[in-house]
Image (cartoon, helix red, strand yellow):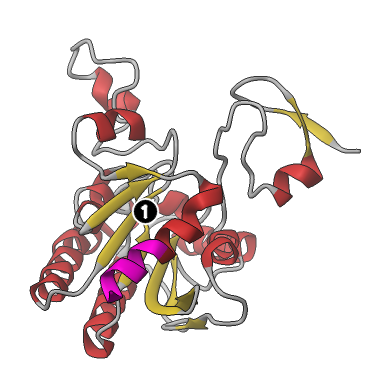
Amino acid sequence: METFLCEHCQSEIDRVLFVEAHKVCPSCDRHYYLSAFERLQLIADPDSFIETDSTIFSVDPLGFPNYLDKLKRDRAKTGLSSDVLTGEVCIQGYPTMLAIMDLGFILGSMGSVVGEKITRTFERGLEKRLPVIVFPTSGGGARMQEGTIALMQMAKTATACAKYSKERLFFISVIADVTFGGVAASFASLGHIILAEPGALFGFTGSRARASIREELPEDFQTAEFMLAHGMIDNIVHRHQMRQTLADLLDFYHG
């Protein structure tokens, strides 16, 4: 039996059982990183996912040192063709457009491809009159290797959300640990329903940047629990209940 120690509570965890439990610690309930494909498997009806825009790739507009090498590395590491997995899927029989970011791809930072694929997801949702579910996660904000082009994606995705919402369609944002920077400040915060996994960190800046303001902040500042208590999100949903919760929300919307 292969085991490891939980980084949060130091309990010994059986690795096979850990994976079967969708990477949640059985002792302290800490939710560990899920890849985009693992998250897709968690919520999707079997064989229902139809990927979209799989041939869109990031380029190197600024000639940034080693950027193309990092993109190649993370494509191999994650199995993703780009920064975000998008497509149409069914959740307990309800068709929906889906976008899942992966923290393992350039730390989930938002470059031009993230903005383009998220925007196209909303456009397809609008065209097909389907709900949109997005799982944002980002530890790096707008991608520095793409400069102003990356920053523009905040306005681009927010505009796509606004056009979609104007048609009274349904957008669910599910915050995973961690979600910071330009992603948090744009489409991640614009869901009609905003859910979060337990303990997920959500905000504009991480702890290092917060330290620069020289103010004492609550210990749980920017956790999902803090955000729920202050009205910034609608609910915290355990990973084991995520699929059913999303299905219930889709059922309510269609009802």
**Quick check: can you spot residue 102?**
no
- Considering every residue shown, the one lying at the far front of the view is 255
Does the stretch in magenta take in 230?
Answer: no
Across and down, in percent, residue 11 comes to 71, 22
| Residue under the point 11% across and 78% down | 167
What is the quadrant of the N terminus in the image?
top right
Q: Nearer the viewer, residue 58 or 98?
A: 98
- Give left or right: position of 69 versus 168: right
Does the stretch in magenta take in 253?
Answer: yes
Q: Which residues are magenta?
A: 248-255
- Give left or right: position of 247 versus 231: right
- Give left or right: position of 48 versus 27: left
State whether the magenta stretch is mostly helix, strand or loop.
helix
Residue at mark 1 = 174
Q: Nearer the viewer, residue 194 or 185?
A: 194
| Residue under the point 53% across and 52% down | 104
| Residue under the point 42% across and 47% down | 176
Across and down, in percent, residue 166 comes to 8, 74
